[in-house]
Image (cartoon, rainbow, N blue to C red):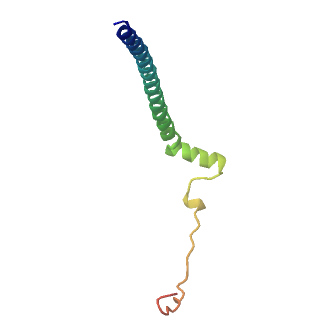
Amino acid sequence: MTRLSVVLFAAVIFSALYLVRVQYDSRRLFTELDRANAEAHRLETERSRLEVEKRAEATSLRVEKLAKEKLAMRTVTPAITEYVSVSAAPAPAVQGGKP
């Protein structure tokens, strides 16, 4: 009987240690999952903020302002418009489907 008791006692101890280990792993994984969800939420918020910022940077008024300031461009007016005319020149002959 004592041998059976020792075996059963060892099995109970092993079972208890295994249970503690499984609970520890479960808590650790739950914490990791919670952190990952918080990080996903933070990244989604950051993505939304960046999309709004990108739309704000691409407005036509901002692009026009940068074109005037950085590239020294100006809006088109009839006073500065130059018209170019091209005289009709004979088209080159096409041979074998290639110009």
Query: Which percent across, then down, holds residue 95?
Result: 50, 93
Query: Which percent across, then down, holds residue 52?
Result: 47, 36
Front-lying residue, 22 or 79? 22
Front-lying residue, 78 or 15? 15
* Residue at screen point 48% across, 92% down: 96
Residue 4 relative to residue 31: left or right: left
| In the depicted structure, whether residue 21 falls above or below residue 9 | below
* Residue at screen point 45% across, 34% down: 48
Work out which quarter of the rendered image holds the N terminus and state it: top left
Q: Could you say which quadrant of the image residue 19 lies in?
A: top left
Q: How many marks?
A: 0
Query: Which percent across, then down, holds residue 26?
Result: 41, 20
* Residue at screen point 43% across, 26% down: 37
Residue 81 relative to residue 1: left or right: right
| In the depicted structure, whether residue 71 falls above or below residue 84 | above
Query: Which percent across, then down, holds residue 66?
Result: 60, 45
Front-lying residue, 25 or 60? 25
Q: Could you say which quadrant of the image residue 17 lies in?
A: top left
